[in-house]
Image (cartoon, rainbow, N blue to C red):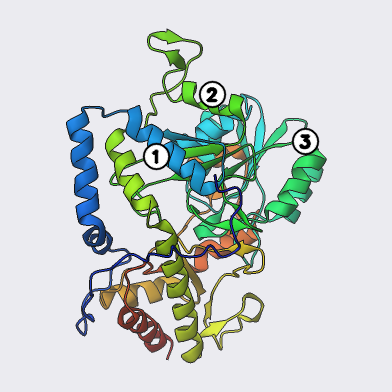
Amino acid sequence: MRKTAPSKPKRSAAKRERPQQKAPKAGAPIPMLDLARQYHSIEKEIGKSVQAVCASQRYVLGPEVQAFENEAADFLGAKHAVGCASGTDAIWLALVAAGVSPGDEVITSPFSFFATVSAIIRAGARPVFADVDPGTLNLDPDAVNARIRRTNSARIRGLMPVHLYGQCADMTRFAHLVDEHKLAMVEDAAQAFGATWRGKFAGTMSIAGAFSFYPTKNLSCYGDGGLVTTNDDAVADHMRRMRNHGSRQRYYHEEIGWNSRLDSLQAAILRVKLKHIDDWNAERHERAVAYDVLFKSAGLLSTRSAKDGARPVVRPLARNKDAHHIFHQYVVRVERRDALRSFLTERKIGTEIYYPVPLHLQQCLGYLGYGAGDLPESELAAQEVLALPMYPEITPEEQASVVAAIAEFYA
């Protein structure tokens, strides 16, 4: 079992062979994500694995899921990995198994996908938001500490940092807060399979860590799928019951659980992709460095503290000393974001906004009592962030075209 990870995981010795890619034609669309390129590189492996599942007639849980769970746990250095139906279910399973109960409060980030907060509510708890660090856009430990001390509520029982865009939150400081305030911590690692903090993989630094294998993720299946990791035998056993209607033995139910079983076809696909994830993550990192170089060469790139209008593009801080960023997304903060996005769309360059509305301002969460101005860093980020095309197979020519178009807009 791989117990720890290097700060920058090495590539496998036998680097995979990738199909030769032709340089894109001038004016050809540059998608935000092109899954077809990845599929073509592993098509034969995928076909063989899917055929094996079909021949086995074991389609839900079963040997293929167990094999993937074992391989994922070994990769991450976790004692247990429990497959489930989605990343959303993974967060819910992690929270419930960690002991979060109705009436509890869980502190988390307002700058994340909706599943982060909906899983807390589904567990019967109340979300409590603390603002993000303006550099990394991850949950800010200082803001969490201030929120706990300001609220002074015995109901705050949980803490859930989000490893946003593929970079781990400051797990060293969060561990101190957990000890000081006696909190149960789980990790929302949905965007961070293979990311590390000080040599430890995301999802292994708390009671439980939740992963998503939605098709846009850096490790993805061909549908929905999720995984929870833990080093606690009782927590793992509880999650296995909860994903299967609260049952260890068929038709005997110890508690009310959920139907959240990972199917064998998705597990088989994930087993193929897991063999390549080190290479793919390394290639994502290389593409991110290439973007940085292109933006600097174009005179566009600034730092978070020096955004004065002269250099309109800010790349959120990568804490390279402590964190190995796997760049699930390459996100910049830009001036006149919506106008730039429209400009790029006209030039057939895909982009996305992660996320346009912070969670504390979502309409359905109005009952929590937050308003505009309560979490200013998250609100500002929601107005500025823009995700650019990022995947291992994107070509240098395509990246150059993306940056050239942005330079043209700000010229």
Q: Which amino acid type is marked by label 1? A: Phe
Residue 237's mark?
2
Quadrant where the image shows the N terminus: top right
Query: In the drawing, what numbered circle is on residue 368?
Result: none
Left or right: 199 in relation to 143: left
Residue 277 vs 318, above or below: the answer is above
Dot 1 crowding, Cα within 10 Å, few <14, some 14–19, many 20+ = many
Question: Is residue 386 something that shows in the picture?
Answer: no
- SS for dot 1: helix
Of badges 3 and 1, nearer the viewer stands 1
Q: Amino acid at mark 2?
A: Asp
Q: Nearer the viewer, residue 302 or 95?
A: 95
* Residue at horizontal 66 percent and vertical 58 percent from the top: 198
Marks 2 and 1, how far apart at CA: 17 Å
Decide: is 11 above or below 261.
below
Q: CA distance from mark 3 to mark 2?
A: 23 Å
Kindly give the residue lying farthest to the top in the view shown: 252
Residue 348 in view in this figure: yes
Q: Earlier in the sequence, mark 2 or mark 1?
A: 1
- Per the image, the residue denoted by label 3 is 182
Helix, strand or loop at disc 2?
A: helix
Label 1, on which residue?
68
Residue farthest along the front direction in this orientation: 13
Q: Nearer the viewer, mark 2 or mark 1?
A: 1
Label 3 secondary element: loop
The x and y percentages for residue 358 are 53, 53
